[in-house]
Image (cartoon, grey):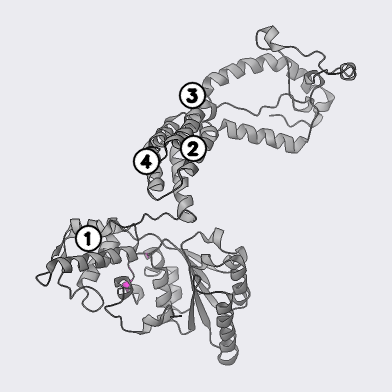
Amino acid sequence: MRDLFESAAEASSESDPLPDRMRPTTLDEVVGQQHLLGKGKLLRRLLEADRVPSLVLWGPPGTGKTTIARIVARMTKAHFESLSAVLSGVADLRKVLAEAKRRRSQHQERTILFVDEIHRWSKSQQDALLDAVERGVVTLIGATTENPSFELNAALLSRARVFVLKSITDDNLLTLLQRALLDKVRGLGNSGVQADDEALQVIAKGSYGDARRALTVLDIAVKDALLLADGGAPEQLSSEMAEESLQHRALLYDKAGDAHYGVISGFIKSMRGSDPDAALYYLARMLESGEDPRFLLRRMVIFASEDVGNADPMALVVATSALSAYELVGLPEGVLPMTQAATYLATAPKSNAVLTGYGAARKAVKTHGPLSVPKKLLNPTTGLTKSMSHGKAYRYPHDLGGLAPGETYLPEDLVGETYYRPSGRGHEQVIAERLKTWRNLQAPEQEAAQAHPHQKNRTGK
C-alpha cells in the first residue's frame, strides 16, 4: 500500500492531480483556517514548537485536514506514520503500534500517527488504539468529516483535542485558483491558459468551500481549453467553460453523515421560525441530493403536531395529504404537494402545546404511578361493580348542554393539575378562551378536592 505521505518527499509530477501538486507544504502557504493557523493561534504555536498533542481535525472535505497532517510530517522531529481508515484494519494498526513501542523503548523516539477518515473505523477498531494513546505510545492525529462526538469513542475523544476546520471562503478559493494558474512548477503556469475573474468566481462559488474540488474543476477546464485550441493559441477560460466543467458536481450531502443532520435541522428550524424561503431552500437541496421524499414527508407530519398543533389543526391534514399525494403521483410531480406542505407549515401559527402537554402528563404518570380511575368514571357492568359504586354520581355531559359544571375526571390526587396549555396563537386562541371558561366552572369542586386529606403530597401548578 502506498504511504499517504510518500509524495511529500518526492518532486511532484505533471501526471499527479492538480490538488496534490498544489498542496501547501508550509503553514504560510495554507489558505483559510486562520482561526487555527494564523500568527499566534494555538494550533500553529503547537506545530511550530513540535509539541503536537493528540488531536482530531474535524471539517468538511477539502478544507485542509490532510494538508495539515502532511505539514506536521515535514516539521516534526518525531517519527511519522499514517494509516487510512478505509484501507487499513486492526492488523495494520497493531503493526504500527508495535514499531512505535520499539522506537520508544530503544531510541526514546516519539511517534505521531495520522489516521485519515478515522470515523470509518468501528468502535472496536478505535478501542485497539485507545491504550496506545493513553500511555503515550503514539500521538494521534485523526481526520474526520463527521461529528467526532457521534463517531469516536468517548474515551478516545477525551484524550484528544478537537480542532474544527471551516469551509474555505470564495475569496480564499479565488486565491488558490489564481495561484495554480500562475505557478509554473507545480501548477498550470506553463499551459498558457488565462482566465478572467468571472470564470474563477464561477468555479469558486460552485465548489462549496472545497479546495480539492475547486482545483480539480480548474484542471478540467484548462485541459478543455487546450483541447479546443487544437495546437493553436490556448483559449481564454470563460465563465461558460467554467460552468460546463462544474456541471457534474455533486452537492455536499451525505445521507448517512453529519451534513444530513445539519441540513434536515436547517429545514425543521426554518419552518419553526416561520421562514418559508429558507424551508424551501433546504427542501430543494435535500431532494436534489437524492434524499428519500418519504423521510422528508414523515418529518413534516411530525412537525405538524409538534410545532403547529392545534394552533392550526389543518396543518396535520395538509402534511398527511402531502404524503398521500406523493404516494399517488411520485416524482417529479410529487415535489409540488411537498412544497405546498412545507410552505403551509412554515406560515402556520406555531404552538408546541401538544408536545409539552404530553410531556407534562407523562411526567405525572412516572411520578405518581397508576393512580385509580375515579369510581364515577367506571362502567357499572355487573351487579358487583354497581354495588362498588362504579358509575355512581356520573353526570352525562350531553344531558347538561355539553358540559357538566364542576365535574372532575383526573384521579383524585391530581385534581387541579393542568397539562395542556394552549399557546393563544391561531386557533389555540379560541381553544384557550373555551378552556378558561370551562376550567373556571370546574373550580369549585377542584377547591374542595384540594382540601381533601389525600392532597397533602400534591405538586400543584
Circle 2 Cα neighbour tier, 10 Å, few/some/many (<14 / 14–19 / ≥20): many
The mark that comes first in sequence, 4 or 3, is: 4
Q: Where in the figure is residue 174, as x and y percent of width and height?
A: 25, 62
Kind of residue at disc 4: Pro
The mark that comes first in sequence, 4 or 1, is: 1
The mark that comes first in sequence, 2 or 1, is: 1
Q: Where in the figure is residue 60, as x and y percent of width and height?
A: 42, 61
Residue hosting label 1: 200
* Quadrant of the image occupied by residue 191: bottom left
Q: Nearer the viewer, mark 2 or mark 3?
A: 2
The magenta-colored residue range is: 29-33
Residue hosting label 2: 300
Q: Main secondary structure of the magenta part?
A: loop
Q: CA distance from mark 2 to mark 1?
A: 39 Å
The answer, for residue 404, to whether it is visible in the render is no
Circle 1 Cα neighbour tier, 10 Å, few/some/many (<14 / 14–19 / ≥20): many
128 lies left or right of 242 = right
Q: CA distance from mark 2 to mark 3?
A: 19 Å
- Please tell me whether residue 226 is drawn above or below residue 72 in the rendered image: above
Q: Where in the figure is residue 149, as x and y percent of width and height?
A: 55, 59
The mark that comes first in sequence, 3 or 1, is: 1
- Please tell me whether residue 363 is drawn above or below residue 90 in the rendered image: above
The mark that comes first in sequence, 2 or 3, is: 2
Kind of residue at disc 2: Met
The mark that comes first in sequence, 4 or 2, is: 2
Q: Quadrant of the C terminus?
A: top right
SS for dot 2: helix
Depth order, front residue of 296/448? 296
Residue hosting label 4: 332
